[in-house]
C-alpha cells in the first residue's frame, strides 16, 4: 500500500510540467554553469531562465547529440569523478521542459545561484609559473599541440600539494597537460623550434610528475591532492605544459599560468602510471572496423584510480576492462565515440582494487574509411603506429597506487616489458632492413637497458660487420664485452676504437670504465681527464670519476664530479644515488634518503638507490628493511658484486 | 521556398531605391558600408549570417575574408548579418574589428532578413541575384558536426554556387544545411 502510494507520487511528479526555477536550475548550475558563465571557456552564459529560454533549439541539438556537456565515457557520471556528463534522466528533464515551452516557474523556487571563486580558487599561491613567452595561435587551421618549457625557480626542493591552471585565454586553450622533465631534452627541443615552445603530439621523454596525470580541461577547477600524495619540484626539473589549442578565427595570444601550493612534506604514496599499448598498428585504407588489442598481467596488487586513453583521429571505440584472478570481469572504461580533441584523464569515484594476477585489457577499434570525417587522409591511406597526426596510436594508461615495496616490482616488470615490445618493433624493422645501422644501434641499446649482454654483443658485432672501420661500432662491441665481464677483450677493442679515432669521447669513457674495472686506475683517470678537459660537463665521465674518488674515500673530490654531472643532466641517476651514498657517509641520512626517493620517483627500479636505502636502514638498525632493499637492488642489478655482498651480509644479520 | 522568394523579390527591388518602403524589412539596417536598400540592389549579393557568440561562425572569419577578397573584384558583394536581437551596433563593430572583417555589417533585430532568406543558423550563407535566392546553406563541409572538423574541407559549397553564378549557370539545387548555432528567436 505504502509502496503503491510512493510510486504514484513519483509518477505524478515526473508527469508534472518541469519549471526552470524548481527543476532545471539545479542541473544547469551543476552541468552547464561551470563553463557557461562570464569569463569562462564557453562562448555564452547559461545561468538564468532567459539565457536558456532563448536557446532551446540549440540546447536540444547539443544535448540530444551528446555534444554537450562534453564527456566521452558512457558512464553518465556514475563511475568517474567531476564528470560533466548528463544522465538520461537529466536529458529527459530538458526535453520535457522544452516541450512544455520552457516555463520559468515560481521565482521562490529558484535555488541560490552557484558561486565561483574569483581569482585563484585556493587563495594566494606559493608560486605562479607562467609561460616565458606569449605564443600566437594562428587564426585558422587544425588544432595545434605544442609543448612549452618553464624552468622551475631555484628555491630548493618542495612538494606540490595543490595546483590550479589559469589558461588566461580560454577561447583558444582547449586542454593543457603538465609534465616534468629533468633531462634538459625538452629545452633542447624548444631551442630547435624558432617559435615559442615546440610542436609535439606525443610525450617524448616527458613524464607525469610522480606518476600523476595533471591536466586542465574546460570547467576544471583546482587540483587538491589527498594527504600523502603530491609531487616534487626543484631546480633540477623543468615544468613542461602540453597545450592543445584550437584556432578561433582570429590570432590569439596564449600565455598560460599555473598556481602551485607547496608543502615541505615529501609524499608518502607514490603513484605509478603504466600503459596498455600496442605498436603493431597496420590499418588498411578503407577498413571501417580494425581492432588493436593489448593486455597485461599485474605482478602485484594495485589500486587503479585514474585512466587516460589515447588514440589519434581514426580511433572510434575504446574498451578497457580487467579479468580478476577469480575469473570475474570488471569494466574500466568504455568510450563509444572517440574524439581526439576531447581526450583527457578520468579519475574513479571509487578506485578499483585489482589483485596480483589480474589481466587488464585494452581494445581499440579504428575506422580508416572515407566515411570517418576525422580521417586526416582523403582518400584514406594505410596507417601505422607513429606520433604524427596522420599516424595512429593505441593506448590506455592506468594510474595506480601500490604498496611501497610493490611499486618497484611493478615498475620493473612494466618497464622491461616496454623495452621488450619496443625492441621487438625494432627487430621487425631489422628483418626488413638488416643493414640499417640506426635500427641495429637501437636494438643494441634496448639490450643494454634489458641487461641482455648476449643480445648486446650480437647486435654490436653486426654493427661492426656493417662498418668495420667505425670507432663507434667498435666501442659498442667493447661495451657489450664489458657487460659479459670479458674485460681483457673489451680493453683491446676499445683501445683499437680510440686509436682509430683519437678524439672519440664515447670510446674514451668506455675505455676508462673498462680500465678502471680491470684495475688500471691510472690509465682510467687519464682517459676521463682527457674527456673532461674537452667537455667539462660530460656526465658519464664525471659520474665515473666521482665513483672512483668515492671508492677512495675522497669525498670532496667525488662530490665535485657528481655535482658537475648533475649540472648537465639533473637526472643522471648514477650520480644521484652515489651522491646519496656520499651524504650517508658524511652523516646525513635524511638528505641521502631524500635523494634516493627522488631517484625512485624517476625510475623505481634503480638498483643503486635501493642499495643506498638499504645502507641507511642498516645503519639505523632496521635489519629487515635493509634486507628488503638489498633484495630489490640485486633483483634489478644482479651483476653488482657490492649489492650481492650487502645482501648476503644483511641476510646473515637478520637470521 | 524559391518561389516564395521570387514573389518577395519584387518587393525587394522596389525598396532598392532611397524611397523604398522600410516597413517591408522592419528593423533591418546597415551599421557599416552601403545602406541596406543599396546593398540589396547589388546584382550578386552574399549575406552571411554570423554571431559573435558562435565559435563556428568566428572560425570561418579567415575563409569569409578570402572569399570576399577573391570574389569582390569579380562583382560579388558580401555583407555580414547579425540577427540575434540582443546584438548592438557597438558590439558587432567591435567584433568585426577583432576578427578583421571589412564587409558591410547589417543588424537584423526583428529577423526580417532572416525570415526572407530562410536563414536559421550561423554561419549560414545566402546568395542573392536579381532579388532571387539561389543558394542558402553551409560555406563548406569543414565542420561535419558541432566542434568536429575535417583536416580540410572536401566540398566548398558557397564557392561552387558563386562559380556557377558567375559563369551564368544556376547553382546546384541541393543546399547542404549549415552546421553551427541556431539564431535565437525574437521574444
Image: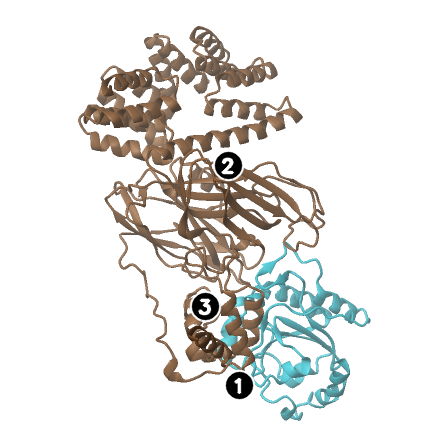
In this rendering, the label closer to the viewer, 2 or 3: 2
Position of the N terminus of chain A by quadrant: bottom left
Circle 1 — which element? loop
Q: Please report contact status of discs 2 and 3: CB closer than 8 Å, yes or no.
A: no
Helix, strand or loop at label 2? It is strand
Instruction: Tell me residue A73's x, y (percent).
Output: 52, 55
Residue beneath label 3, please? A32
Lower sequence index among marks 2 and 3: 3
Residue occupied by mark 2: A296
Residue A582, quarter of the rendered image: top left
- Location of mark 1 (residue): B187
Q: Which chain is brown?
A: A
Coordinates of residue B40 in the picture (x, y in percent)? 68, 82
- Image colour for chain B is cyan
Q: Residues within 10 Å of mark 1 (few under 14, many from 20)?
A: few
- Asked where in the image residue A641 lies, by quadrant, the reply is top left
Amino acid at each position: 500500500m505504502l509502496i503503491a502510494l510512493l510510486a504514484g507520487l513519483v509518477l505524478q511528479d515526473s508527469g508534472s510540467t518541469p519549471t526552470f526555477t524548481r527543476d532545471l536550475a539545479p542541473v544547469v548550475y551543476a552541468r552547464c554553469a561551470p563553463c557557461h558563465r562570464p569569463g569562462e571557456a564557453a562562448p555564452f552564459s547559461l545561468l538564468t531562465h532567459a539565457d536558456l529560454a532563448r536557446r532551446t533549439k540549440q540546447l536540444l541539438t547539443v544535448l540530444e547529440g551528446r555534444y554537450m556537456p562534453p564527456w566521452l565515457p558512457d558512464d553518465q557520471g556514475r563511475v568517474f569523478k567531476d564528470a560533466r556528463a548528463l544522465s538520461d534522466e537529466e536529458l529527459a528533464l530538458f526535453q520535457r521542459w522544452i516541450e512544455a515551452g520552457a516555463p520559468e516557474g515560481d521565482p521562490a523556487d529558484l535555488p541560490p545561484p552557484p558561486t565561483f571563486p574569483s581569482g585563484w580558487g585556493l587563495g594566494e599561491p606559493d608560486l605562479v609559473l607562467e609561460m616565458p613567452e606569449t605564443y600566437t595561435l594562428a587564426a585558422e587551421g587544425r588544432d595545434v599541440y605544442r609543448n612549452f618549457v618553464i624552468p622551475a625557480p631555484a628555491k630548493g626542493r618542495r612538494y606540490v600539494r595543490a595546483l590550479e591552471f589559469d589558461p588566461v585565454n580560454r577561447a583558444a586553450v582547449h586542454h593543457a597537460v603538465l609534465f616534468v622533465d629533468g633531462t634538459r631534452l625538452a629545452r633542447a627541443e624548444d631551442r630547435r623550434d624558432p617559435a615559442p615552445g615546440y610542436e609535439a603530439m606525443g610525450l617524448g621523454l616527458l613524464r607525469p610528475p610522480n606518476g600523476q596525470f595533471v591536466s586542465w580541461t574546460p570547467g576544471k577547477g583546482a587540483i587538491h591532492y589527498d594527504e600523502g600524495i603530491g609531487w616534487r619540484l626543484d631546480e633540477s626539473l623543468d615544468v613542461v605544459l602540453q597545450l592543445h589549442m584550437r584556432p578561433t578565427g582570429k590570432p590569439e595570444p596564449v600565455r598560460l599560468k599555473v598556481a602551485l601550493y607547496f608543502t615541505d612534506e615529501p609524499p608518502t604514496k607514490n603513484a605509478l602510471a603504466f600503459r596498455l599499448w600496442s605498436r603493431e598498428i597496420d590499418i588498411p585504407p578503407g577498413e571501417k572496423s580494425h581492432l588493436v588489442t593489448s593486455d597485461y598481467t599485474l605482478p602485484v596488487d594495485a589500486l587503479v584510480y585514474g585512466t587516460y586513453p589515447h588514440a589519434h583521429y581514426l580511433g572510434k571505440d575504446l574498451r578497457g576492462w580487467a579479468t580478476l584472478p577469480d575469473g570475474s570481469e570488471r569494466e574500466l572504461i568504455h568510450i563509444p565515440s572517440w574524439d581526439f580533441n576531447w581526450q583527457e584523464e578520468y579519475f574513479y569515484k571509487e578506485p578499483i582494487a585489482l589483485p596480483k594476477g589480474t589481466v587488464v585489457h585494452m581494445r581499440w577499434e579504428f575506422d580508416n574509411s572515407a566515411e570517418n570525417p576525422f580521417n586526416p587522409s582523403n582518400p584514406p591511406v594505410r596507417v601505422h603506429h607513429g606520433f604524427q597526426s596522420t599516424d595512429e596510436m593505441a593506448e590506455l594508461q592506468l594510474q595506480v597506487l601500490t604498496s611501497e615495496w610493490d611499486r618497484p616490482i611493478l615498475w620493473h616488470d612494466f618497464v622491461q616489458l616496454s623495452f621488450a615490445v619496443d625492441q621487438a618493433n625494432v627487430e621487425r624493422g631489422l628483418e626488413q632492413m638488416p643493414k640499417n645501422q640506426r635500427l641495429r644501434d637501437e636494438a643494441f641499446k634496448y639490450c643494454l637497458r634489458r641487461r641482455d649482454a648476449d643480445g648486446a654483443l650480437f647486435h654490436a658485432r653486426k654493427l661492426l660487420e656493417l662498418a668495420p672501420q667505425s670507432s663507434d661500432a667498435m666501442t659498442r662491441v667493447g661495451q657489450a664485452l664489458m657487460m659479459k665481464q670479458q674485460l681483457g677483450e673489451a680493453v683491446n677493442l676499445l683501445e683499437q676504437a680510440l686509436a682509430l679515432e683519437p678524439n672519440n669521447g664515447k670510446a674514451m669513457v668506455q675505455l676508462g670504465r673498462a680500465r678502471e674495472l680491470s684495475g688500471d686506475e691510472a690509465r682510467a683517470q687519464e682517459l676521463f681527464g682527457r674527456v673532461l678537459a674537452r667537455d667539462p660537463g660530460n656526465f658519464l665521465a664525471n659520474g665515473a670519476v666521482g665513483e672512483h674518488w668515492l671508492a677512495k674515500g675522497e669525498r670532496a673530490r667525488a662530490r665535485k664530479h657528481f655535482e658537475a654531472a648533475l649540472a648537465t643532466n639533473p637526472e643522471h641517476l648514477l650520480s644521484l644515488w652515489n651522491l646519496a651514498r656520499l651524504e650517508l657517509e658524511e652523516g646525513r641520512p635524511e638528505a641521502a634518503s631524500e635523494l634516493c626517493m627522488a631517484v625512485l620517483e624517476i625510475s623505481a627500479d634503480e638498483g643503486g638507490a635501493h642499495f643506498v636505502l638499504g645502507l641507511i636502514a642498516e645503519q639505523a638498525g632496521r635489519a629487515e628493511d635493509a634486507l628488503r632493499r638489498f633484495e630489490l637492488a640485486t633483483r634489478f642489478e644482479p651483476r653488482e658484486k657490492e649489492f650481492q655482498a650487502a645482501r648476503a651480509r644483511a641476510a646473515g644479520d637478520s637470521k | 521556398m524559391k518561389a516564395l522568394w521570387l514573389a518577395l523579390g519584387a518587393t525587394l527591388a522596389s525598396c532598392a531605391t532611397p524611397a523604398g518602403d522600410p516597413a517591408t524589412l522592419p528593423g533591418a539596417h546597415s551599421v557599416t558600408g552601403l545602406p541596406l536598400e543599396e546593398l540589396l540592389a547589388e546584382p550578386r549579393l552574399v549575406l552571411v549570417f554570423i554571431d559573435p557568440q558562435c565559435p563556428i561562425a568566428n572560425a570561418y572569419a579567415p575563409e569569409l575574408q578570402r572569399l570576399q577578397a577573391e570574389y569582390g573584384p569579380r562583382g560579388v558583394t558580401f555583407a555580414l548579418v547579425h540577427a540575434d536581437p540582443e546584438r548592438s551596433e557597438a558590439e558587432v563593430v567591435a567584433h568585426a574589428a577583432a576578427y578583421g572583417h571589412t564587409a558591410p555589417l547589417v543588424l537584423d533585430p526583428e529577423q526580417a532578413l532572416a525570415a526572407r532568406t530562410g536563414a536559421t543558423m550561423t554561419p549560414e550563407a545566402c546568395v542573392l541575384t536579381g532579388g532571387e535566392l539561389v543558394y542558402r546553406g553551409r560555406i563548406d563541409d569543414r565542420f561535419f558536426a558541432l566542434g568536429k572538423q575535417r583536416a580540410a574541407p572536401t566540398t566548398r559549397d558557397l564557392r561552387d554556387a558563386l562559380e556557377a553564378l558567375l559563369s551564368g549557370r544556376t547553382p546546384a539545387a541541393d543546399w547542404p544545411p549549415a552546421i553551427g548555432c541556431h539564431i535565437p528567436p525574437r521574444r
